[in-house]
Image (tube, rainbow, N blue to C red):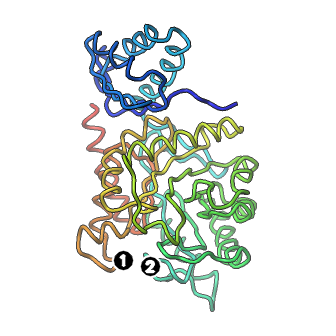
């Protein structure tokens, strides 16, 4: 059954525990303008635009305002989504339980080390893929990431850089399966980075315990069914378009709201289809159909994403917008920008940081997390 309740994004709820107002953005809200008027009469601030309401109000007063406009039919679903979103924003992330072990995202950010088993990766030029001795080079690279402090390894056999061509199924399987099997055998938490349902199925059978799909299920109709069948955590990512064309003039009216609403609808849909909510991770998809300006807005809004109630993954490492900002063309030399983005994400509530430079990222994340905790003290 479709969940047609409004979607609630929390921008700030720090004062709610003391009875104060929250700053919220609601979309898909019936009679938003009338509710805004009632909120204003109750000493709140509201601005409506179609079915969208931006409001600063005590949550209970917002619900009361909706009740005065449309009775329980309007107030009850609004109250449910607002209460859940505010509670999630205040509570922080839950742990992520995988078949290979629990990632402690409830208590600290974790680092997901990137292992590209491809000859054409934008970030490392295929250094972990040696066709002559495959999979030995990739396994060594994965072991080095674990030794450097990675909490989990993200293995991908198809480049998703802008303009990249798809990789045939058999070739992708040949690249990733022996690496997944070898690293999973060490007890590591392994994610398979793929947009293909068949690859996800085979990789989980080989030992992967997370499916990381940068397409959000949009590029392969089998992916959704695979995720529902496999029973492992799934990273739901926002992608505008597809890798070959995603960076050709991507446009949004409001990138934060549109990405948030897309992820919220995705979570609802997966849960409605039977995937437990605690199996879902959300990722705004930095660089996947976004300009530098879009990426910065999403980074700044990381805390908003926590109101979805799921661990937030941020993957900014070595991406081109960091090169644009720093003037560094070589992706492997973008470490300072990558660390700065990771720190911003962590202080905003991200709990999984996808990174190439694992040792440096682990250290930066530790400091950023300590800063965030001191703010909450």
**What is the x, y in percent for residue 33?**
38, 22
**What is the x, y in percent for residue 214?**
55, 59
Q: Which mark is residue 332?
A: 1
Front residue of this view, candidates 232 and 260: 260
Q: Tag 2 or tag 1, which sits nearer the N-term?
A: 2
Q: Which mark is residue 268?
A: none
Residue contact between numbered discs 1 and 2, judged by CB atoms under 8 Å: yes
Does residue 243 lie above or below 76 as drawn?
below
The residue wearing badge 2 is 124
Q: Is residue 201 left or right of residue 359?
A: right
What's the residue at 45%, 77% (across, down)?
Answer: 122
User: The C terminus lies in which quarter of the figure?
Assistant: top left
Q: What distance separates the C-alpha of mark 1 from that of mark 2?
A: 6 Å
What's the residue at 74%, 60% (across, down)?
Answer: 201
What's the residue at 30%, 48% (across, down)?
Answer: 300
Q: Is residue 36 left or right of residue 195?
A: left
Does residue 30 lie above or below 209 as drawn?
above
**What is the x, y in percent for residue 196?**
68, 64
Does residue 6 lie above or below 333 as drawn?
above
């Amino acid at each position: 059954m479709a969940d047609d309740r409004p979607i609630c994004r929390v921008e700030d709820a720090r004062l709610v525990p003391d009875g104060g107002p929250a700053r919220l953005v609601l979309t898909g809200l019936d009679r938003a303008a009338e509710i805004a008027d009632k909120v204003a009469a109750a000493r709140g601030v509201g601005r409506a635009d179609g079915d969208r309401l931006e409001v600063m109000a005590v949550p209970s007063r917002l619900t009361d305002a909706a009740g005065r406009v449309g009775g329980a039919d309007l107030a009850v679903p609004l109250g449910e989504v607002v209460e859940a979103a505010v509670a999630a924003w205040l509570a922080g992330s839950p742990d992520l339980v995988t078949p290979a072990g629990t990632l402690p995202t409830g208590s600290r950010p974790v680092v997901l080390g990137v292992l590209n088993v491809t000859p054409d990766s934008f970030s490392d030029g295929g250094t972990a893929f040696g066709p002559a001795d495959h999979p030995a080079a990739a396994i060594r690279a994965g072991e080095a990431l674990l030794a450097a402090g990675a909490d989990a390894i993200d293995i991908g056999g198809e480049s998703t850089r802008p303009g990249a061509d798809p990789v045939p199924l058999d070739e992708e399987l040949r690249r990733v399966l022996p690496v997944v099997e070898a690293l999973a055998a060490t007890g590591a938490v392994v994610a398979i980075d793929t947009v293909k349902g068949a690859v996800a199925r085979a990789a989980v059978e080989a030992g992967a315990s997370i499916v990381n799909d940068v397409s959000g299920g949009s590029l392969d109709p089998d992916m959704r069914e695979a995720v529902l069948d496999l029973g492992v955590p799934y990273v739901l990512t926002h992608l505008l378009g597809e890798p070959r064309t995603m960076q050709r003039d991507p446009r949004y009216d409001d990138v934060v709201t549109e990405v948030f609403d897309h992820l919220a609808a995705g979570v609802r849909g997966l849960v409605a289809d039977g995937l437990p909510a605690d199996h879902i991770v959300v990722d705004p998809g930095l660089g996947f159909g976004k300009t530098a300006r879009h990426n910065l807005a999403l980074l700044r809004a990381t805390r908003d994403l926590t109101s979805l109630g799921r661990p937030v993954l941020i993957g900014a490492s070595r991406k081109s917008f960091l090169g644009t900002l720093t003037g560094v063309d070589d992706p492997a030399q973008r470490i300072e920008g990558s660390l700065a983005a990771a720190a911003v994400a962590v202080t905003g509530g991200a709990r999984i940081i996808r990174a190439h430079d694992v040792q440096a990222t682990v250290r930066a994340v530790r400091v950023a997390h300590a800063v965030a905790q001191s703010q909450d003290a």
